Image (spheres, grey):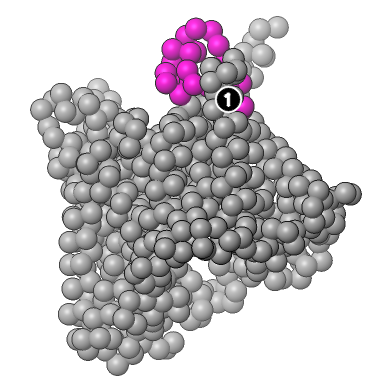
């Protein structure tokens, strides 16, 4: 972008003031993400109602909880896109590293009685170790084989968790986190705002890590691997190490997300270990726009919000009054999300974030053909 | 001895169920490079179609005798139609975008079970099987449930039919050639797209038949049944080598047997784990699967 704008500025350099003004404007607008961040930070203080979007004022504990989940899943999808959108690795086992963060942290608190900070560090470490080990194994195969091996490992872990070995994981019930071991400021409905800020902090961390790593030299190699892995090899680089770096980084961010999710929901549930969980991450990324900065975040927020609100919608009077042909499919959030997903793939390649650009392009091409139609007669 | 016979036959029955799902999955993947995540949904459609017909909604079909056979035919037909619709409406428009084809099947795989549970509820429904198939039969000193034998027989019939179709007919020749080298077949001026639809129809029919007879095996139908079997079908396809029918048949048997024996001789649930470990080990030794096909 700098390359594109600077020469244009220099040709007009006879008068220096427009250059510095545009330069200053450009520098100022580069920090625009700070504005939504401040807005997001202030959300718990707001009592503004968002009719249709949320039930009641934004700052109420229930809405804060939902917003926190939206932020966590937006961040999680952003981390997952490090593999799919940035390196071109289609992993079907991302749930495993998320669940490792949740379950290891929770189990150490429950069984060893260690305080939260120590347990969370160990949970994060477990995520790093597990993603390094399993990544090293599954990256030995490429293409769809890689997807299947990651799926198989995650499935094995999911079965293990549901089998409840030694009563440690709690099986299908999951296990609640011990309130006594958690920091007092993060427990209880009156501290929902603090939990929200934790979720927001996690989102900021993920966005910073992903942006910095994607812009680093390693990030450029990832892009090369995504475009054409053979060419990267020909350039004298071994893709394996770079892919493993991406895998471990994404796994670590997921484990961190698992710990935040543990705090938010107050326990570990086996649903987070299933392949459906990974598939929902995949849906979020594709919905928003894979390989873009804000796409996975937008997709994650939209998916999580829709998943929760569509459940309310199905019970509302507006739907129960409909004829059966419409009411029956509308009562299933997963049906709507699945259909929406197919529609996005089909109608919106590149996801939601590409929508404004596509609309603009459509308008200019229509204007161009319209102008021609006027001129020709 | 009788335990071993019983475990072997029930393992084979489970393997037969995996084969019914995996055979179509493997052919679709081999020909089109599409990992069909909606395949489990096709199986559920077949199961529900059969259940719906056998519950007296289709004239002549019912829970007993010839009526049940008609119900199975009806369920299989519904599954085949669903597969053809899936190919025409979802897969074909995304012809030039293989990864998006996979993602679209993920969406369908989420939506169809949700739709089924919206219409008939999320709980399992008892499956109306004929009395004659609900008993056991004495075989080498073991009392083997009859439905396992029905499954094995169905899988053998499907295997034989697919062999004849692929080996003896012109359409089969095109499909086989497409699995080997899609670009070459296209270059020869043959419309591979017709073969795509055909393979989807065949795969859908096999999966729907699996769903119909799988209903007998489980004794009930529920919307998530197909999806939970799908993971093992994936394992079978990858282990057997993508696109290989023989590989799918061999590994279905192996996976079914390993699962059944490990579940009996160790704690229950370890069989599922053993299958996954087997897959990881095999892929590390032979990344291209058992038959050396491209993974």
Front residue of this view, candidates A70 and A27: A70
For label 1, the residue is B164
Q: Most prominent secondary structure in the magenta stretch? A: helix
Residue shown at the point (24%, 30%) measured from the top left: A229
Q: Is residue B272 above or below residue A91?
A: below
Please tell me in which quadrant of the rendered image residue A160 appears. bottom left
Viewer can see residue B230: no
State left or right for residue B124 relative to residue A92.
Answer: right
Residue shown at the point (76%, 70%) measured from the top left: A317
Front residue of this view, candidates A366 and B132: B132
Question: Percent x, y for residue A177?
Answer: 34, 84
Q: How many marks?
A: 1
Q: Is residue B192 above or below residue A101?
A: above
Viewer can see residue A110: yes
Please tell me in which quadrant of the rendered image residue B221 appears. bottom right
State left or right for residue A107 relative to residue A190.
Answer: left
Question: Percent x, y for residue A262?
Answer: 35, 75
Please tell me in which quadrant of the rendered image residue B293 appears. top left
State left or right for residue A377 relative to residue B204.
Answer: right
Residue shown at the point (59%, 24%) measured from the top left: B165
Decide whether residue B179 is among the magenta residues: yes
State left or right for residue B87 relative to residue A32.
Answer: right
Question: Percent x, y for residue B229?
Answer: 51, 54
- Most extreme residue toward the bottom is A180
Q: Identify the chain of the residue marked 1, using the numbered disc in the image.
A: B
Decide whether residue A220 is among the magenta residues: no
Range covered by the magenta-colored residues? B174-200
Q: Is residue A221 above or below residue A323?
A: above
Residue shown at the point (53%, 53%) measured from the top left: B13
- Most extreme residue toward the front is B141
In the rendered image, which quarter contains the N terminus of chain B? bottom left
């Amino acid at each position: 972008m700098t390359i594109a704008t600077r020469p244009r500025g220099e040709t007009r350099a006879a008068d220096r003031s427009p250059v510095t003004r545009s330069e200053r404007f450009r520098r100022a607008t580069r920090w625009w993400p700070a504005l939504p961040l401040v807005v997001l930070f202030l959300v718990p203080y707001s009592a503004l109602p968002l009719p249709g979007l949320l039930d009641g004022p934004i700052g109420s504990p229930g809405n804060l909880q939902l917003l926190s989940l939206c932020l966590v899943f937006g961040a999680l999808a952003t981390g997952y896109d490090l593999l799919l959108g940035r390196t071109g690795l289609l992993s079907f086992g991302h749930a495993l590293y998320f669940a490792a963060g949740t379950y290891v942290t929770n189990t150490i608190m429950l069984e060893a009685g260690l305080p939260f900070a120590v347990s969370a560090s160990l949970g994060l470490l477990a995520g790093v170790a597990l993603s390094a080990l399993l990544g090293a194994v599954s990256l030995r195969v490429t293409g769809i084989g890689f997807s299947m091996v990651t799926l198989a490992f995650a499935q094995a872990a999911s079965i293990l968790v549901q089998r409840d070995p030694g009563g440690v994981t709690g099986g299908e019930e999951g296990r609640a986190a011990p309130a006594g071991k958690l920091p007092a400021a993060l427990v209880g409905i009156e501290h929902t705002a603090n939990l929200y800020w934790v979720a927001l902090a996690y989102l900021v961390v993920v966005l910073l890590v992903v942006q910095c790593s994607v812009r680093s030299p390693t990030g450029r190699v990832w892009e090369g691997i995504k475009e054409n892995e053979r060419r990267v090899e020909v350039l004298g680089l071994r893709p394996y190490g770079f892919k493993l770096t991406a895998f471990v980084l994404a796994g670590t961010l997921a484990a961190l997300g698992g710990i935040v999710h543990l705090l938010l929901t107050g326990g570990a549930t086996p649903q987070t270990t299933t392949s459906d969980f990974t598939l929902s991450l995949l849906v979020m990324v594709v919905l928003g726009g894979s390989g873009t900065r804000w796409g996975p975040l937008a997709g994650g927020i939209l998916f999580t919000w829709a998943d929760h609100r569509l459940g309310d919608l199905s019970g509302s009077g507006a739907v129960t009054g409909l004829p059966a042909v419409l009411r029956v499919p509308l009562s299933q959030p997963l049906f709507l999300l699945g259909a929406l997903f197919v529609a996005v793939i089909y109608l919106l390649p590149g996801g939601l974030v590409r929508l404004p650009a596509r609309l603009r392009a459509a308008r200019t091409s229509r204007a161009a053909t319209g102008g021609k139609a006027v001129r020709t007669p | 001895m009788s335990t071993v016979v019983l475990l072997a036959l029930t393992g084979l029955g489970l393997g037969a169920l995996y084969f019914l799902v995996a055979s179509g999955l493997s052919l679709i993947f081999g020909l089109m490079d599409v990992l069909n995540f909606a395949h489990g949904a096709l199986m559920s459609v077949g199961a529900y179609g059969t259940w719906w017909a056998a519950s007296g909604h289709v004239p002549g079909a019912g829970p007993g005798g010839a009526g049940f056979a008609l119900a199975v035919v009806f369920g299989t037909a519904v599954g085949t139609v669903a597969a053809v619709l899936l190919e025409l409406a979802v897969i074909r428009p995304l012809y030039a975008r293989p990864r998006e084809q996979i993602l679209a099947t993920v969406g369908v795989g989420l939506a169809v079970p949700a739709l089924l549970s919206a219409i008939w509820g999320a709980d399992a429904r008892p499956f109306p099987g004929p009395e004659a198939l609900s008993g056991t039969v004495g075989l080498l000193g073991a009392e083997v449930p009859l439905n396992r034998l029905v499954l094995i027989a169905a899988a053998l019939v499907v295997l034989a039919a697919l062999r004849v179709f692929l080996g003896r007919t012109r359409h089969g020749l095109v499909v086989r050639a497409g699995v080997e080298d899609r670009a070459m077949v296209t270059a020869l001026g043959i419309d591979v797209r017709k073969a795509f639809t055909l393979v989807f129809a065949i795969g859908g029919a096999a999966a729907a038949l699996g769903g119909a007879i799988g209903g007998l095996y489980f004794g009930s139908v529920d919307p998530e049944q197909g999806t939970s079997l799908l993971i093992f079908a994936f394992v079978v396809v990858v282990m057997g080598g993508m696109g290989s029918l023989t590989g799918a048949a061999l590994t279905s048997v192996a996976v079914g047997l390993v699962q059944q024996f490990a579940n009996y001789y160790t704690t229950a649930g370890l069989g599922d784990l053993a299958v996954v470990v087997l897959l990881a080990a095999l892929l590390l030794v032979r990344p291209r699967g058992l038959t050396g096909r491209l993974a």
